[in-house]
Amino acid sequence: MQQSSRHRSADVALGYAADHSGHGIAYAAIGTGTGRTVVRLPFGVPALPALDGREQGYAAVATVGGYLRARGFTRVRIRLAEDAVVDDLNARRSVPPGLTMEYVKTRCILHGFAAARVERAEPIETRDLETRARADVALQSPAAA
């Protein structure tokens, strides 16, 4: 009897937000072909204000990637609204020195999949997820208390 390798695939829309200290929330809508679920995942990253939140995007992608790997997914497509993060992770340009470590961490997680793609999402795919993440971050902020 011939064994076949079964690959679990996920199509993910990702929305995220983080506060000025780098504490963030990622919401991922995960489609598997048999269903769709939304998960809320906290993440943390050193805040680098001069880099327009790209470090937050890397951390959100890495967090979702880790979540998917832990659940046995081997092929993933992650879509997010940040062009700069998508371009960086697809090696379309050089990464600023301040982002190098977060970039390497994220690429290592993505390389752990049999196939992983990071793509630009249409705003309608991520708008609600980003809104939920911003609301959660605002609620957790000390200024909101």
Image (cartoon, rainbow, N blue to C red):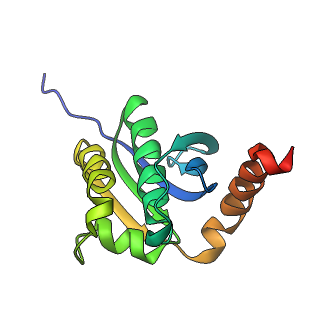
Task: Find residue 86 and report its horizontal and vertical position in percent.
Answer: 38, 70
- Residue 121 versus residue 2: which sits nearer the camera? 121
- Residue 119 versus residue 44: which sits nearer the camera? 44
Q: Residue at x 62, y 41 (%)?
A: 39
Is residue 83 found left or right of 37 in the rendered image?
left
Is residue 100 found left or right of 24 in the rendered image?
left
Note whether 111 is above or below 120 in the view shown: above
Picture quarter with the N terminus:
top left
Q: Residue at x 30, y 65 (%)?
A: 89
Task: Find residue 78 and report its horizontal and vertical position in percent.
Answer: 43, 58
Q: Residue at x 43, y 30 (%)?
A: 71
Task: Find residue 61 and report its horizontal and vertical position in percent.
Answer: 43, 52
Is residue 41 found left or right of 145 in the rendered image?
left
Task: Find residue 62 and report its horizontal and vertical position in percent.
Answer: 40, 47
- Residue 97 versus residue 127: which sits nearer the camera? 97
Picture quarter with the C terminus:
top right
Q: Quadrant of residue 98?
A: bottom left
Q: Return the residue found at the far top.
A: 1
Is residue 57 found left or right of 40 in the rendered image?
left
Q: Residue at x 40, y 38 (%)?
A: 66
Numbered label tally? 0
Q: Quadrant of residue 3?
A: top left
Q: Return the residue found at the far left.
A: 2
